[in-house]
Amino acid sequence: MDKIRRALLGQIAKLTAGAALVPLSSVASAGINDQPPRREGDPDKRYAMLIDLRACIGCQACTVSCHIENEAPLGNFRTIVSQYEVEHEETGDVATFMLPRLCNHCENPPCVPVCPVQATFQRQDGIVVVDNDACVGCAYCVQACPYDARFINEHTQTADKCTFCAHRLDVGLLPACVESCVGGARIIGDLRDPESQISRMIKEHYNELMVLKPEMGTSPHVFYLGMDERFVSRPDAKPAIWDVRDQQGEEVGYEFSGH
Amino acid sequence: MSSAVIEVLAPRYGIAWYPWAVQYFFLIAVSYSALLLTVPGLLLGKKDFQPLARVALLVTVSCTLVGPVALLADLHQPLRFWHFYANLTPWSWMSIGSLLLPVYLLLVVVYAWLAWRPAMQEQARGDGWIARISGWITLGQWHSPRWMQVLSGLGALAMSVGIMVYTGAEVAIVKARPLWDTHWLPVMFVLTGLVAAAGLVLLINRLMTGNNEDVNRQSLKVIFVSMILSALVAALWVSEGITGFSPSVEQAFASLQRNPEWRAVALYGLLVGVALTLITIAMLRRAGWLARSWIAGLLAVHIGWTFRWMVLMEVQTVAKNTAGYYQYAIEAGSSGLLGIIGTFGLWLAALLIIDILVPWKKSFQAGAH
């Protein structure tokens, strides 16, 4: 708690400097809670990711490299691999299922229209980003995201999320998670380019691809290959281990949920 | 194929809206509801309702002043509040709210100022520092015409409708949380707001005025009608979930399935709701019991506040993607317990400062000719 306030005091000096005003022309004809016009980014591209779950071994290399690249606070994740132990109730056979999660850079992102200051917006290339100099930290976007892909960064006291490593893409590099994936399970690319690997794979596996929570009407742009439909929405599962940290973010041990 | 699934390692996502949000939603709902209670006595000039209007006006002003402070505190970057006005965003409910709120606050203050002004002008003629301050606040001895009172009242009422709609819609449009995503939520916010406002009026009527019987009776009636309507709305919401009429409500039920804590919450809500309704009937029927209406007032305030706590805080512990439920333990610091106590402390301070400076118990027409 005190850390939060200290961080806030540290921020005060920086508060006003970068708060770029959005030109009034962008206040277009969008109705309440409609998607506002996209801005910035390359209009000729539409980035998306395909995750080949058949190639994911759940090593969490993506989780770690993302953490290092984007300096998320301890305990917060821009991407993480959910791991499930699935036991067949009759035969007793056990299998594991890995599900990398990240921002879905939806075509209809519910986090964008709720933002009261236009700090979170969708670029013309489809990437959803947050302008941390404009963000007031109201956390409305955190509530609106059905995928828990957003959090309030305790260091910046503003909304934080996966950006497909836009800063790397813009200079021709791959996102940290893609770069570090040992199985090559994560494929990022431009959907507008029919020759890109992702476009070719989507064409090839079109009928097998799934997205998370399609019922939310968000049209996610992270596609899963080799997905089990029981995991598309909140899975009917029991938590085994909670990661326990104290107020300072220090790990205090593991706790079994006791069920 | 039946299988048992275990999520091996479940990350815990923190709470994004703090108890400050509960305080804001509570205070602003009490504010607009108490404003409605001033209408018959103050705006329409009905004599029988003037004692009620006097207490309700004090409630509405004190809550209107303190509510926005709690809202500001819920921002993680409170000093950036001006970004709301530098980046107008008409498609965001929260942005719309940021425009409505200051206008509402201003109109409520003007409405109360005009109502209290005649008595304060009289007070300003006396000696001492209170008289001097009263002179400054009243801005002179000129007579304020009735149309100003009516106009500011109508303006505040119009804005209060805006506040009701925006605070409700802001939460109800969040599809990601099926427990919020229902058009009944804004209605329920208003109804429980009326219950809490009438409850607070009962408490202040007992503590600060002479426990006026008319005020007790009228407030109990407001609570009774609001509780009956709340029960109806809750029943409609439940039936939408059971019949599958609303897939979102159905999903909301599914998200709480087999959770004993939430079942206990539902049972508790039902019990206190029935208890308050029955107590209200008993107190209205038995003449001797009317003086103890403050007990119903306490319960009513409890229901209004706890409803918001459950909706805004506990719903955040329902995981969107991961297995299980997050454990929310309220912190001792300013984003937790201290924030809750601090907000109520500030409200009490506002109430007492008004009580010192404003002769609010006097008839509205005092000093006016």
Image (cartoon, grey):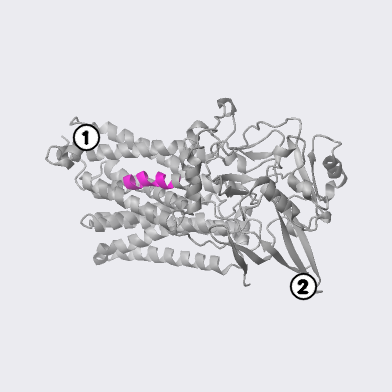
Task: Kindly identify which residue carries mark 1.
Answer: B136
Residue sitting at x 38%, y 45%: B32
Badge 1: residue crowd in 10 Å (few <14, some 14–19, many ≥20): few
Q: Main secondary structure of the magenta part?
A: helix
Disc 2: host chain: A
Disc 1: host chain: B
Closest to the observer, A90 or B145 = A90
Whether residue A78 sits left or right of residue A61 in the image: it is: left
Residue sitting at x 75%, y 49%: A211
Mark identifier at residue A89: 2
Closest to the observer, B360 or B75 = B75
Whether residue B360 is visible to the viewer of this picture, yes or no, is no
Secondary structure, mark 1, is helix
Whether residue B34 is visible to the viewer of this picture, yes or no, is yes
Badge 2: residue crowd in 10 Å (few <14, some 14–19, many ≥20): few
**Dot in front, 1 or 2:** 1
Residue B97 lies, in percent from the top left, at: 47, 39
In the rendered image, which quarter is residue A34 located in? top right
Closest to the observer, A17 or B348 = A17
Which of the image's four quarters has the C terminus of chain A? bottom right
- Residue type at the position of mark 1: Trp
Residue A200 lies, in percent from the top left, at: 86, 41
Residue numbers of the magenta segment: B60-71
In the rendered image, which quarter is residue B279 located in? bottom left
